Image (cartoon, rainbow, N blue to C red):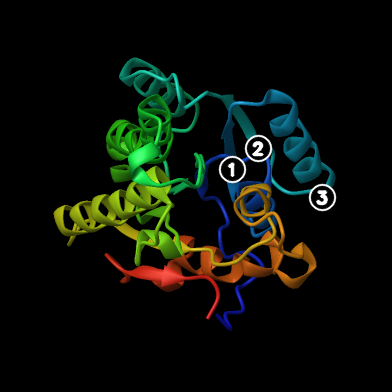
Amino acid sequence: MDYRPRDNLLQDKLILITGAGAGIGRAAAKSFAEHGATVVLLGRTIKKLEHVYDEIEQAGSPQPAIYPMNLEGASPKDYEDLADTLEKEFGRLDGLLHNASLLGVLTPIEQYDVNLWHQVMQVNLNAPFMLTQACLPLLKQSDSSSVVFTSSGVGRKARAYWGAYAVSKFGNEGLMQVLADELENTNIRVNSINPGKTRTTMRAAAYPAEDPNTLKTPEEIMSMYLYLFGEDSKEINGQAFSAQA
């Protein structure tokens, strides 16, 4: 997308990012902060979150916040506690990026391990549902808020062997559409992004023979993310976007 965001596009916005410790989540956190947002870094590895925190501070961007959470084991009460913390500290939420995902394994459905299936669904689909549900009251406190689900090419046109990952991403698209329809004519807009072929650890695990240098870096696909969290997309709701043409 040939979008050129203003330097202060996200000024004074508070945006929560899951999976913020690496890859696309890390790039989004740094990019959002660079454009004026206060970002809440959510992830399971504190050391990675602290590294991103330091990078944002060193760049002179607004001071971020860290909220460690393992989505695989998180309960509804954990999400309620997170929302309560955000309410006490900030009073609202302007954006929510569902970025954290598990790949699982590439194998036929006939051979897919049931426990792994549940694990992937918990992180990729159940967690975004519970987190969004808990944060909706905070999102309603914002003048204009954005929820973005991270999709995938196999979440829009499935392929053999992609199993739980593909099904979970189809679920993300469905959840996005339901929410967008329910929240139409409110201050909350809900959309999805397919990042496309991007140089991440997950991509390397799925395509081990692929040359990563042929892929765009997470930093190179941020324009679509900035667009959907800024006011230029204020009227956009229920749409499935691709970060790469």
Give the image location of residue 239, x and y in percent. 31, 69
Is residue 107 among what the camera can see?
yes
Q: Are the two marked residues, 1 and 2, in contact with CB atoms closer than 8 angstroms?
A: yes
Residue position for label 3: 59
1 or 2: tag closer to the N-terminus: 1
* Quadrant of image for the N terminus: bottom right
| Three-letter code for the amino acid on which mark 2 is drawn | Pro
Q: What percent of the width, then of the height, locates residue 87?
A: 40, 28
Task: Measure how far apart labels 1 and 2 are at the Cα level.
Answer: 5 Å
Residue 90 position (above or below residue 17): above
Q: Disc 3 residue type? A: Ala
Local SS, label 2:
loop
Mark closer to the chain start, 1 or 3: 1
Q: Is mark 3 on a helix, strand or loop?
A: loop
Mark sitting on residue 64: 2
For the residue carrying disc 1, how many other residues have a C-alpha within 10 Å: few (<14), some (14-19), or many (20+)? many
According to the picture, the residue beneath numbered tag 1 turns out to be 39
Name which residue lies at 34% across and 35% down: 135
Q: In this view, does 202 lie to the left or right of 109?
A: right
Q: Which amino acid does label 1 sit on?
A: Val
